[in-house]
Image: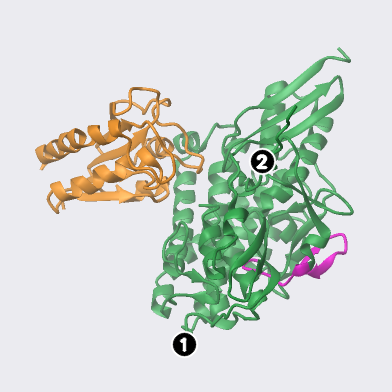
Chain colours: A green, B orange
Amino acid sequence: MADETRTIKTDYLARVEGEGGMLIRLKGSEIEEVKLNIFEPPRFFEAFLRGRYFAEAPDITARICGICPVAYQMAASHSMEAICGAKVEGQLNALRRLLYCGEWIESHALHVYMLHAPDFLKLPSAIEIAAVAPEVVEKALRLKKIGNHVMTVVGGREIHPINVRVGGFYRTPSKAELEAMVPDLEWALETSVETVKWANTLDFPDFEMDYEFLALDAGGVYPIEGGDRFATNRGLNAPLDEFYDHVAEDHVQHANALHGRMRERGSYLTGPMARYALWYDLLGDRAKAAAEEIGLPKEVKNPYKSILVRSVELVEACSEALRIIGEYEQPAEPAVEVTPRAGVACGASEAPRGTLCHRYRIDDTGIILDATITPPTAQNQPQIEADLRGFVSKFMDLPHDELTLRCEQAIRNYDPCISCATHFLNLEIERT
Amino acid sequence: LSGILVVGTGNSWRGDDAVGLEAATALREWLPQSVRVLATEAEQSSLLDEWEGCDTVFIIDAVHSNAEPGTIHRVDLNAETVPHAVLKGSTHHFSLGDTIELARALKRLPATARFFGIEGAAYAPGEPLSPAVAAALPALVEEIAKEVEGLL
């Protein structure tokens, strides 16, 4: 028995964006192998950005993902604006944050209710939840629709918005257009508060990890649409342009997505739990109250409880959207002028699932010479594998099916976007 | 308005996956204005809202089930589920099959709900419809148009 080999395996992960699988091999009580396999085909975005005009980057990179296109548009715009010395501030930046709140609302609502909840309710998918608790799914659909609507009003359409450009927008909405969304957003805010309470009724395994959390430092506000610095809970706080001095990306054989790691320390976590742990004090009153009401500590280390943190962020996104609309005054110009100049810079934003960093180098005519894109799921892969290792070593006596489900859930805890992560493949040809 | 929605869905840049969109475009020409016709590449779960309040919906999409290219799959959605082999999961969270099953569970499927799937052959980026699918399209458009006209 001691040397019995046991394999925990899921060939195709359900309820994640993109194509991936999982393999864990145990020999007796030794974990021999843990692999998050990412076999989604490579996407080559960084290569085909080369030679394109700098102003095209937000629209090209938005196509990487249908769930978080705004994250890409913002990171690309920030990077180009940093290179060209342009600043997008005031109401234009507030509009960017509002657009991004729309993305957080639709993405977090989808993940909390439709993708993550089935794990806790031990049902295969949201369709089965709809059969037993239709009101839960109706609520999720309406929340998601409200998030999508914010994206349509500010961004022109819900998937791959067309109204974003380097320097701002093509057109800004009127105050009346934004105010028309207030009743829906007020409903969404109250529903999000209820969501936090509902999520707290779920059962969580007793499991914690000692994480290094990484998130943007947005200079006094909860990081959403951007930030000029990034920080971790291990004392690192540096300008964004030093991101790649601290974060390395490695190619591993079992994934078409690069593995991110801290050069000195290894795996780290980016996403809601990191933002929350680093910037709890910057959350709005409603989000803090919702967290306090369920007794959520200021730092959550149980990855299965990411659903609670994501729900608190849902509250934050709804409150922020309402605050921005309340304070909105339509800007005189929809964008600031951005004139290309040669240079290199990083730009980043907080995608629903974590920090997304872009770095571009352009020449003085605005042509992109090279591009590096580091999505959150790529960064989180080693940490997901570490969580799996930690969970299996603690709970290896669970019945096989239950352990398999918990391991799949350990991956879904991260709301991974595999399509985003797979933009690279190191092709090696062996010749004899 | 007639309470009838005809919706074609797919991806206009992926070969035969555009066939639902092309069918809807052709049906828009054919059918009277009282029939709502939608060619959409939007996220599939949004269809739940599109057919809200309708008593009849016709859904057209490309399918991949290893049948002969150009084969038409007809499914009465209130009498049967879409076979999994016909409408496989999308990698984008909510597939058309998921959306239909979700609508059924939420009792949000119109009283008459028909699915028309056209077996595709090739889905390469930027390619036009393959010959077998292009050849099957006119007869399918005529079949759906006549069926809708019969309901008016």
Left-right relation of B32 to A388: left
Q: Residue at x 81, y 69 (%)?
A: A238
Which image quarter: residue A77?
bottom right
Q: Residue at x 37, y 37 (%)?
A: B100
Estimate the spatial distance between the alpha carbons at disc 2 and disc 1, rounded to whole Å. Answer: 45 Å
Q: Which residues are magenta?
A: A224-241
Mark 2 chain = A
Element carrying mark 2: loop
Name the outermost residue toward the top.
A1
On residue A256, the disc is 2
Q: Quadrant of the N terminus of chain A?
A: top right
Q: Residue at x 15, y 37 (%)?
A: B142
Q: Amino acid at mark 1?
A: Ala
Q: Nearer the viewer, mark 2 or mark 1?
A: 2
User: What is the x, y in percent for residue A150?
Assistant: 46, 65
User: What is the x, y in percent for residue A163?
Assistant: 45, 69
- The correct choice, above or below, for A409 with respect to A91 in the image is above
Bin the neighbour count of mark 1 within 10 Å (Cα to Cα): few under 14, some 14-19, many 20 and up.
few
Element carrying mark 1: loop
Q: Which residue is mark 1?
A: A332
Q: Are marks 2 and 1 on the same chain?
A: yes
Assess whether mark 1 and mark 2 are in contact (beta carbons under 8 angstroms). no
Looking at the image, which is closer to me, A430 or A388? Answer: A430
On residue A91, the disc is none
Q: Amino acid at mark 2?
A: Asn
Sequence-wise, which precedes: disc 2 or disc 1? 2
State whether residue A374 appears in this view: yes
